[in-house]
Image (cartoon, coloured by chain):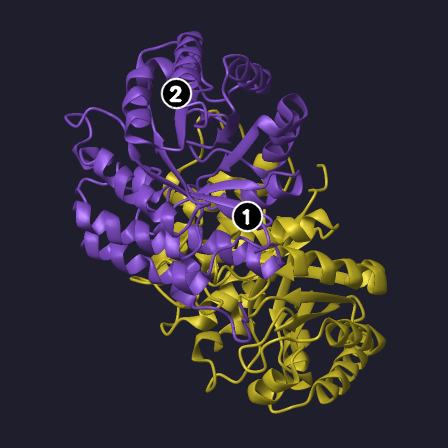
Chain colours: A yellow, B purple
């Protein structure tokens, strides 16, 4: 099978589920993740290793990881990943057997202090410990960092691009394998996306990671296109646009996986994803979260006449 | 005042109002158009010259044109334009004093026959008459064609790119001043947008016209970005995303002017539009169409912290 032209990392079961009040029952998480894997997604962020009292939605994360790992018998190229906020979370995630961990590190010092009560420097020190832990216990596991607020911060406004790039370099120096950029606040624009990812790729080479874009102001897909134009080939998105702090009805936070896959496939850029099966994967999502709004223009409008994929 | 980098043509008072069931009262149309002009929009499609029994929403079009023309005392660079389906409509529009007329011509033969019961060839003959009429009665008036279904057709599926370009050339040969491309069906993708507008500009030079994109499958802004990337500097959009056949709640048809302006201004591409006044122009729109949904992510989310424009 041909390697897809772009790599889509589905973040819904983590980013989406931790953003909603309801907790999806474990059995529904299993069905949803099964459907995502069946649709061809080959990287799924299945949960967060955080204390259950902070995020009860993620209390079953070890069990969910175990279920997802069992899918690799059928889909050996499936990467089961989880978010870990720190060394302690990484320890639990490695014990559970994940193939990849992702850590959020704020590009904005104000956001870092407000969000995790640590400076960016302290977070880099934490990364060094996580990388050392990985080297010791599970050398095959990939450690990713997503630089949140990389395109702007709701607390401090602009985030200097030089600081974003310097922090990305510091992450790699700490032993991280991939550093992506996240538009946590929906402030990115295509010109900025091209500038920052061009610099990131120049500095980090193949350690430059994914574009994690939000659709807060409607620019999610335009920003993904801009990232693609400058060579980015890995994208985070969420089925039904779940998560990413939507502001209002009709407003999704995360880029909608269905629309992202539609855009790329329509352009002739292969994603490895079967869009019909992807749209079908909305059923277990909505069944497990009754009443929760899901977004996506392509599922609403349907595929165009003459669509052959 | 510096000429804006891009030219945005607001189509809401025509494309939007003719797509909704309710008829906006004439006084509200006046207030809305005033607000659009005050926001800095310098091309407004204020109505359609079609028989009132077909489109009662447009029965007051001559009066609306007169009102909009009065605004040119204050905004001499304002282009008051209207849609005309044929020579008869053009006659009425010229008599009313519009500065620009736009005619829709289907790129798809199937759509042309279904929509206006004329072949594309017959439409080109009609254009020739409209251009002759303009030359005779109002030589300063611009005649624009928007090639609808240029990126795909709900009846016939794909529309061959060679046919689109050949039809554009035929329109210019018939005496048309500008030929734009419309994604009537929301089937366009950025790769196709770049290909077609690159060819259009190569064939027509400065007679290549606007990109009229729809957001049916969420790609509206990405397609505008793609068009901008290959040199397009004129864009149609609609305040609140009104019109363009929305399929579903939360789904706008036309590209939302507010989001389009936000994207360009955030990129440092000037539009000449004051986004605060633009968002304020939603008030007369919603006041004149009570209960009608309006779209737009930027108005919902608000402008980002640190936004200086």
Mark 1 residue element: helix
Give the letter of the chain under mark 2.
B
Residue B161 position by quadrant: top right
Q: Nearer the viewer, residue A306 or B296?
A: B296
Residue B233 position by quadrant: top right
Give the letter of the chain under mark 1.
A
Q: Nearer the viewer, mark 2 or mark 1?
A: 2
Residue A210 lies, with reference to residue A125, above or below; the image says: above
Q: Is residue A39 visible?
A: no
- Is residue B12 toward the left or the right of residue A276 in the image? left
Which residue sits at x=81%, y=77%? A170
Q: Nearer the viewer, residue A139 or A16?
A: A16
How far apart in space, not on screen, are marks 2 and 1 (Cα)? Answer: 25 Å
Which residue sits at x=77%, y=73%? A162
Tell me the residue that label 1 is attached to.
A260
- Is residue B89 toward the left or the right of residue B127 in the image? left
Q: Is residue A154 visible?
A: yes
Q: Nearer the viewer, residue B69 or A299?
A: B69
Tell me the residue that label 2 is attached to.
B155
Image quarter where the C terminus of chain A lies is top right
Where residue A257 sits: x, y (%)? 52, 51
Residue B107 lies, with reference to residue B258, above or below; the image says: above
Where residue A200 sits: x, y (%)? 78, 63
| Residue farthest to the bottom, as pictured | A117
Residue A82 position by quadrant: bottom right
Where residue B58 sits: x, y (%)? 22, 34
Residues indicated by labels 2 and 1 sit on the same polypeptide chain: no
Image quarter where the N terminus of chain A lies is top right
């Amino acid at each position: 099978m041909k390697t897809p032209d772009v790599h889509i990392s589905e973040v819904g079961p983590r980013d989406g589920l931790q953003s909603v009040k309801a907790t999806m029952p474990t059995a529904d998480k299993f069905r949803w993740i099964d459907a995502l894997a069946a649709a061809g997604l080959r990287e799924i962020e299945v949960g967060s290793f955080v204390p259950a009292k902070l995020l009860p939605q993620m209390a079953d994360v070890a069990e969910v990881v175990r279920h997802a790992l069992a899918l690799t018998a059928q889909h050996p190229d499936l990467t089961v990943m989880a978010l870990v906020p720190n060394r302690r979370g990484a320890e639990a995630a490695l014990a559970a057997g994940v193939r990849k961990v992702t850590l959020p590190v704020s590009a904005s010092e104000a956001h870092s202090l407000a969000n995790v009560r640590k400076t960016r420097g302290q977070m880099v020190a934490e990364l060094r410990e996580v990388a050392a832990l990985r080297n010791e216990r599970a050398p095959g596991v990939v450690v990713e960092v997503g630089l949140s607020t990389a395109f702007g911060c709701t607390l401090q406004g602009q985030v200097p691009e030089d600081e974003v790039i310097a922090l990305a370099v510091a992450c790699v120096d700490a032993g991280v394998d991939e550093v992506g950029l996240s538009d946590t606040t929906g402030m990115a624009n295509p010109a900025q996306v091209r500038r920052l990812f061009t610099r990131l790729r120049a500095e980090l080479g193949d350690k430059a990671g994914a574009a994690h874009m939000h659709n807060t102001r409607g620019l999610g897909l335009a920003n993904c296109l801009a990232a693609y134009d400058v060579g980015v080939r890995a994208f985070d998105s969420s089925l039904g646009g779940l998560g990413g702090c939507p502001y209002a009805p009709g407003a999704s936070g995360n880029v909608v996986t269905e629309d992202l896959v539609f855009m790329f496939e329509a352009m002739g850029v292969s994603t490895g994803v079967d869009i019909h099966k992807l749209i079908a994967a909305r059923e277990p999502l909505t069944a497990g979260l009754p009443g929760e709004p899901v977004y996506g223009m392509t599922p609403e409008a349907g595929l165009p006449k003459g669509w052959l994929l």
